[in-house]
Image (cartoon, helix red, strand yellow):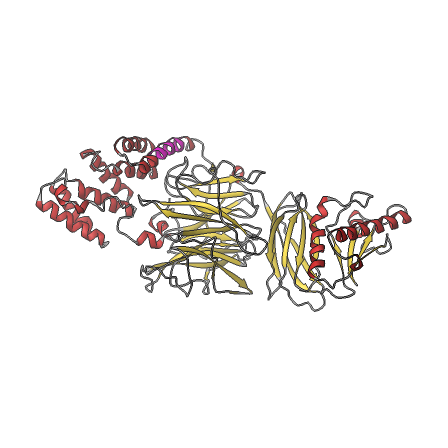
Amino acid sequence: MINAAWRLAGNHLRAALAGVCAMGLATGLLAQPARYTTTNGKAIKLYESGAECMRQRKWDCAEGNLKKAAAEDPRFLEPRIYLAEMYEERKLAKEAMAVYREVLAINPAYFPPAALHLAELEMGQGLYDEARKHFNLAKQHDNDPQRRQRATRGIANADFAEHAMKLPVPFEPVNLGPGVNTAEPEYFPAVTVDDSTLMLTRLVKDQRSPYGVQEDFFVSHKQQDGTWGKAQPITTVNTVDNQGAGTLTPDGRFIIFTQCAGMDGSYGGGLKGLGSCDLFISRRVGDRWSKPQNMGPPVNTGGWESQPSMGSDGRTLYFLRGARSRDGQQNTDIYVSRMGEDGTFGKPELLGPNVNSAGKEESVQIHPDGKTLYFSSDGRPGMGGLDIYMSRMKPDGSWGEAMNLGWPINTGGDENSVLVDANGSLAYFASDREGGFGDLDLYGFELYQEARPTPVTYIRGRVTDKATGKPLEADVKLYDLATGKLATAAYSDPETGEFLVCLPIGVDHALNATAEGYLFFSRNYSFSAVDGNTPFQLNVQLSKAESGQTFALRNIFFETASYALLPASTVELNNLLGLMKATPALRIEVGGHTDNVGNDAANQQLSEQRANAVREFLINQGIDAARVLAKGYGETRPVATNDTDEGRAQNRRTEVTVL
């Protein structure tokens, strides 16, 4: 269950502190003193003094005066309503419920929102029968359509919760320890695909902030013993103003996060924004993070964007967009924006009704498998408050019906900030449960089988110049061989050449690495029987596009004993075509090679035919025939032994040599 600090999480800080009454329910009660529910002058004076203290957030003064005002007249409703609001804002649920019950006992029709808020508090305490009764009472006396809709959802939640508690799911959370957690609130975890780097948001005390607190990013690295090391601040990203709710790309080289404007409407750290909260991006080069840049339109608008989650392809961004409704509720929906060929993100699309609801969605995570979405919502049947849900992508790209993760993962309070690791078995979340280090802590728990995504493995490697060994910044892409679609991508670090890309198990992929002025590197992987905990290591050496350089096309495929190109070759052929178009002076020889199985003459002929098939593809796509030669070498130039299946597979290849 989430305490008051959670309301400050995810860049709701400015909005949460902007007014005294977060719900905005009773703020008009002072405006018409002639209509007070008492004629007792002393009671009215005490009430007005208490209300003024409440506006100044002087809680002891407010509570004392409001209690005295209520005691002066046992049927004086206004101080009781203000008391209930104050207790609710301070997360004193039991005290708030007791006062709301007094209000309803005196006159259930005078202040209709009282029944709704009492019912929602009762849901948070697991009092489902009482909550159902008060939700029905709210619908009986409240004509406001938005609050009536909340009451209708509340009744469905009470029914769902009672059923869910009879069918509990496995749940044994473990605190992530003192390296990550402190007495301050920690939330919104983000972890790299290799589970070695954890980023989190922490609410820290800061007297430079007009609020006295603000959100900063911290990073922790996993130690050899499996524990998390002491989290360190990201100094080049953190500012005195509020930023949080960040997402790491799977390789840990990009952060996309939320920055909100201050009370004067300006952004901290010299940043410029479009709306009240915008998304920003920062890149890590070596051990240094770049100055954040606003992602700009169409991702950011004049409204509110927050809580991003980047897909493992490095080109698909999920995030929240929303606005505050007239009853004070933050209505947020999940959007997705996809990067185009020009490297910019396109117009965001609203996810469908199986994900977004009439309520608010929060804390979205697209799992590295690219097809499993985790998020929180209060707009569909649940335990009450925000519950965690999961939706799976259908073959047509739409999202399936959201599944509630069940009790006791979800409770009557707000559950949020969940992240599932690449392997799919471990989930992280924030909680203020007893036994922690104070306030919100980050925990991990083993996710039960039905709620798991497709496991993801990864390839870790380094890109260098083949001749000099110098690290290179390269664009590393993996394509689904069956569909030809981009599965995931990453850029290698320009200082170290290191890269990491992840991809789901059960699919064959083609890997290509390209850098300006160099020939590309290609390789294929079969992940159909690979353990997700066993990553690949790969050193990529790129050769400059100079005469005499040779590279293998590992993703050119032919029908058995034939020179007919298979559809899976399309990605590689297009990459070669792109190289030829980008380098107009480039002349190449396409060489065909076979293993030693079969007749020598037949192998020679087959190698020539296969080389010509690649040449004909390029010519048909507009490449000058004089720039492409084709030659067959048969079995005469093996690169591995022909005594094993693996060796023979390496010998059956197509190569390109620069002339």
x%, y% of residue 157? Answer: 38, 34
Assess whether residue 298 is covered by the magenta stretch.
no
Front residue (pair 517, 171): 517
Q: Residue shown at 53%/46% (left/top)?
A: 367
Q: Left or right of 113: which side holds 458?
A: right
x%, y% of residue 626? Answer: 80, 59
Q: Residue shown at 81%/48% (left/top)?
A: 644
Q: Left or right of 55: which side holds 647?
A: right
Q: Residue shown at 30%/54% (left/top)?
A: 18
Front residue (pair 385, 15): 15
Span colored in magenta:
151-162
Q: Residue shown at 45%/37% (left/top)?
A: 406
**Residue 422 vertical placement versus 407 (above, below):** below
- Viewport quadrant of the C terminus: bottom right
Location of residue 638 by image quarter: bottom right
- Viewport quadrant of the N terminus: top left
Location of residue 261 by image quarter: bottom left
